[in-house]
Image (cartoon, rainbow, N blue to C red):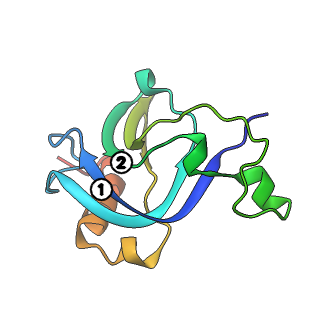
Amino acid sequence: MLDSGYRHDVAHSVRVLDAEHPITAGLGDTLDLTDELYLYEVFEDDVTPLLESDYTFDREHFYSAHHAVTGKMFCNDDWPHPNGSGLVGWSKVCRQSRIAYLQPGDGPATFASEEYRRLLENAIRWAANQST
């Protein structure tokens, strides 16, 4: 089974892909964040893309989560993982449920960002069907 990858404290720029969506309302074109990133599979055809990181999402830039939980932090030895998506924010409606995925939000630097807090509030309001 394929495990995800992680990378701590990455300084990266996040581009807003859909400025008209209620989740990204009031944000600028980009957010500069320092946060943990994940190398994971995204079914891009099934979601509405909202945010994309400029970081390189490939095996060489991440570490195996499986190795980390087995005591080998910061290791990607013998870890076959395909390239991933830079999509770090997306939304989807499934039946009557609104789903918002925001990868950022791991550390204090991100939570200190006024733009990130606006993004998080927008996502909560959208998921609760309280946005315009």
Q: Residue 40 appears at what percent x and percent y?
A: 58, 40
Secondary element under disc 2, as helix, strand or loop, is: strand
**Given contact means CB atoms under 8 Å apart, are the residues at marks 1 and 2 in contact?**
yes
Q: Is residue 77 above or below residue 47?
A: below
- Local crowd at mark 2 within 10 Å, few (<14), some, or many (≥20)? many
Instruction: Please indicate, yes or no, whether residue 23 appears anywhere in the rendered image.
Output: no
Q: Residue 118 appears at what percent x and percent y?
A: 25, 64
Q: Residue 124 appears at what percent x and percent y?
A: 36, 56
- Local crowd at mark 1 within 10 Å, few (<14), some, or many (≥20)? some
Front-most of 98 and 85? 85
State how far apart marks 1 and 2 are (Cα). 6 Å
Q: Which residue is mark 2?
A: 53
Q: Is residue 3 above or below residue 48?
A: below
Q: Report the residue at 13% width, 56% height from top.
A: 26
Q: Is residue 95 above or below residue 22?
A: above
Q: Report the residue at 33% width, 43% height from top.
A: 52
Q: Report the residue at 28% width, 59% height from top.
A: 119
Give amino acid for label 2: Ser
Q: Is residue 115 above or below residue 16?
A: below
Q: Left or right? Give the position of 82 relative to 22.
A: right
Q: Which residue is mark 1?
A: 13
Q: Report the residue at 40% width, 29% height from top.
A: 47
Give amino acid for label 1: Ser
Secondary element under disc 1, as helix, strand or loop, is: strand
